[in-house]
Amino acid sequence: MKAKETSNSQQNVQTKGNGQGQVKPQGKKKEEGIDLRTLLIQCAQAIAVNNLSFAGELLKTIRHHASPYGDSSQRLALYFANGLEARLAGTGRKIYQKLMEKRTRATDMLKAYRLFIAVCPFARVAHYFSNQTIVDVLNGRQKVHIIDFGIMRLAKREGGPPKLRITGIDVPQSGFRPYTTIESTGKRLAEYAEMFNVPFQYQGITSKWENICIDDLNIDNDEVLIINCMYQAKYLGDETEDIDCPRDRVLRIMKKINPEVLILGIVNGFYSSPFFLPRFREVLFHYSSLFDMLNTTVLQSHEERGAERIERPETYKQWQVRTLKAGFKQLPVNQAILKRSITEKNKWYHNDFVINEDSGWLLQGWKGRIMHAVSSWKPKDSYTNQKDQN
């Protein structure tokens, strides 16, 4: 699959490490001396001090130079201008709801994801970390219960696949069919398990994470219990919502579930500040790196590019403090996983991607800015008991 993805994407992405093959942008020509990022920050500053007329003039200038088909700064400016305009008009929530109601075709999502996989190692490395950690924890045992996971690597295990049970947890969707997504996910997983002859059972639970009842998980004593939480915790409320915030409550629930291992993947960002201006600066820097990465690795002409806060990313150091406080013991990064991830990155991806480790986290980034982090944990009690038994 890796070779096929790379081959199919070869004509659409730039040559690894040197930027060859880039075509000229179809949008507006970038003019000398125009620093769109500085203009965006100035506009945010004007909004922060309620200088709405000046903010409006800056928005006109930004829109004049922005383009959905230009380079990274022009594309970035277009979307941030839309956000600033929504902030000015106080319509951020309505715009978000309209975006969520606009259903993207599954084929378009798949095309975009395949392109992302071909040019960026973030998802592939995170899934490899998660899959290999699960395989290592199983250690030949015959029953596994994974809360939210995929199954391909289990099918190739020596001695045959274990009996696999997956519990998918998600909030109900809006509309007349609130359970459609979680039910269709279970159906696809069952079909996939059948392809690889993996004994499979699925249960879907629709609930806010912080309201999960552990009894509903139907945990058996003889199964290996694993919690997999990859890149979704950013949607949980933080201390600006409640002192005893949802993300802390969810970590405590995970501790009570008492899994053999918790696999935690997070988007590394620092734009969860309750104050608009510092939050805007951080999110601008974060997405500047993402847009720069895509601008460097994907042709600009490629057809598959494409006030209330919904995402509240924190840094991996902040998540480390939260998870330790909830009663987990962090496990060290498996050096074999790290070594292979670096080797694969060097072989298939652009030289400016970064893979490293720090404080028990496997880190991924672009040009020195850390974008993603993944780690594994054990409840402190089970860690202590296991140590005493050994």
Image: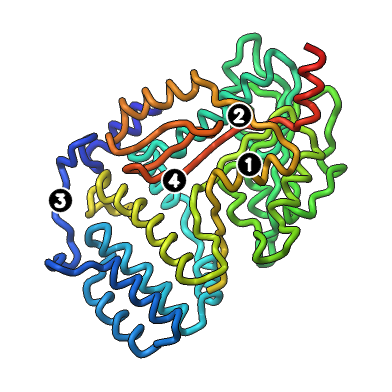
Q: Front-most of 107 and 328?
A: 328
Q: Of the residues shown, which amino acid type is indicated by label 4?
A: Met
Q: CA distance from mark 4 to mark 3?
A: 27 Å
Which residue is tagged 1?
229
Q: Quadrant of the N terminus?
A: top left
Residue 288 tag number: none
Which residue is tagged 4?
371
Which residue is tagged 2?
151
Q: Of the residues shown, which amino acid type is indicated by label 1?
A: Cys
Where is residue 355 shown, x and y percent of the image?
40, 33
Mark with earlier residue (4, 3): 3
Q: CA distance from mark 3 to mark 2?
A: 39 Å
Tag nearer the camera, 3 or 2 = 3
Mark with earlier residue (1, 2): 2
Label 1 element class: strand
With respect to residue 13, does 130 lie above or below? above
Q: CA distance from mark 4 to mark 2?
A: 26 Å
Mark with earlier residue (4, 2): 2
Q: Of the residues shown, which amino acid type is indicated by label 2?
A: Ile
Q: Residue at x 46, y 32 (%)?
A: 125
Q: Residues within 10 Å of mark 4 (few under 14, many from 20)?
A: many
Tag nearer the camera, 1 or 3 = 1
Left or right of residue 339: residue 202: right
Q: Quadrant of the C terminus?
A: top right
Residue furthest to the top: 159
Q: Residue at x 73, y 39 (%)?
A: 167
Q: Of the residues shown, which amino acid type is indicated by label 3?
A: Val
Q: Residues within 10 Å of mark 2 (few under 14, many from 20)?
A: some
Where is residue 263 shown, x and y percent of the image?
63, 35
Left or right of residue 367: residue 21: left
Which residue is tagged 3?
23
Mark with earlier residue (3, 2): 3
